[in-house]
Image (spheres, rainbow, N blue to C red):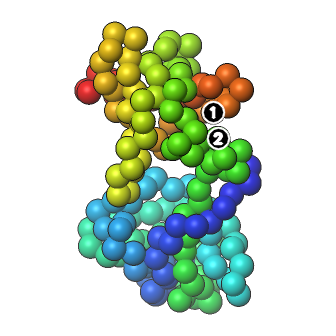
Amino acid sequence: MAYRYQILLGRISKVSGYNGTVSVKLEKSFFDNIPEMESVFLEIDGKPVPFFISFSEYSGGDLLKLKFKGYDSFEKVSEYTGCRIFLTTFSEEKSAAASPESISGFKVILKNKELIGTVKETIQNPGQDLLNIISPEGKEILIPFHEAFILKISTKNKSILVELPEGLTDIN
């Protein structure tokens, strides 16, 4: 899966303790809005280097604690103090097919092949874009437009295959 790093999460401000945990000073847009992350990119010598997360803790404010897989000591992570951290984003394949302008009219289908509806528009909110979907019954349904829920986007079939948490479509 090819990643692009574009969204600045923050900067490593210090190493916390001796077990390799770092404190990340967050960008303001992420205060109280931390996405689920499996990996991030650290900018090292101007180049993106992927790091996989083994632990994360956010207790509010502008600091996030992270621990990276394979980096379990102060010595292993101290050289990264000051590095900028970027979020991983959609793969090239998904991002090309997932531009807000290009998915209007796409069918949204659950993993079990059940039709949710057709994309009316993409609502761009700070921190989370939403798909505004019109169900076959004419009901508006909003779902997060997030890679965690999207299994496949097919431009050929004009469809988006999703796996959603149970009950998400019922709360609209």
Which quarter shows the C terminus?
Answer: top left
The total number of labels drawn is 2
Residue at image coords 30%, 18%: 139
Q: In the rendered image of this protein, does residue 137 appear above or below residue 39?
A: above
Of 141 and 101, nearer the camera is: 101
| Looking at the image, residue 81 lies above or below residue 3 | below
* For discs 2 and 1, the disc positioned in front in the rendered view: 2
The disc label shown at residue 39, or none: none
Few, some or many C-alpha atoms within 10 Å of disc 2 (few <14, some 14-19, many ≥20)?
Answer: some
What is the x, y in percent for residue 68? 58, 68
- Contact flag, marks 2 and 1 (Cβ < 8 Å): yes
Q: Going 50% across and 12% down the picture, which residue do you hit?
A: 114
Residue at the image position 71 percent from the left and 87 percent from the top: 45
For the residues labelled 2 and 1, the Cα–Cα distance comes to: 7 Å
Residues 143 and 15: in front is 143
Q: Residue drawn at (46%, 53%), measured in percent from left and top?
A: 36
Answer yes or no: is residue 67 visible: no
Is 93 situated left or right of 112 in this image? right
- Amino acid at the residue labelled 2: Ala
Is disc 1 placed on a helix, strand or loop?
strand
Q: Amino acid at mark 1?
A: Ile
Q: SS class of the residue under badge 2? A: helix
Residue wearing tag 2: 97
**Res 16 → quadrant:** bottom left
**Residue 113 rendering spot, x and y as whole percentages:** 56, 13
From this view, report whether residue 152 is shown above or below residue 88.
above
Quick check: 55 left or right of 142?
Answer: right
- Whether residue 157 can be seen here: yes
What residue is pinned by disc 1? 153
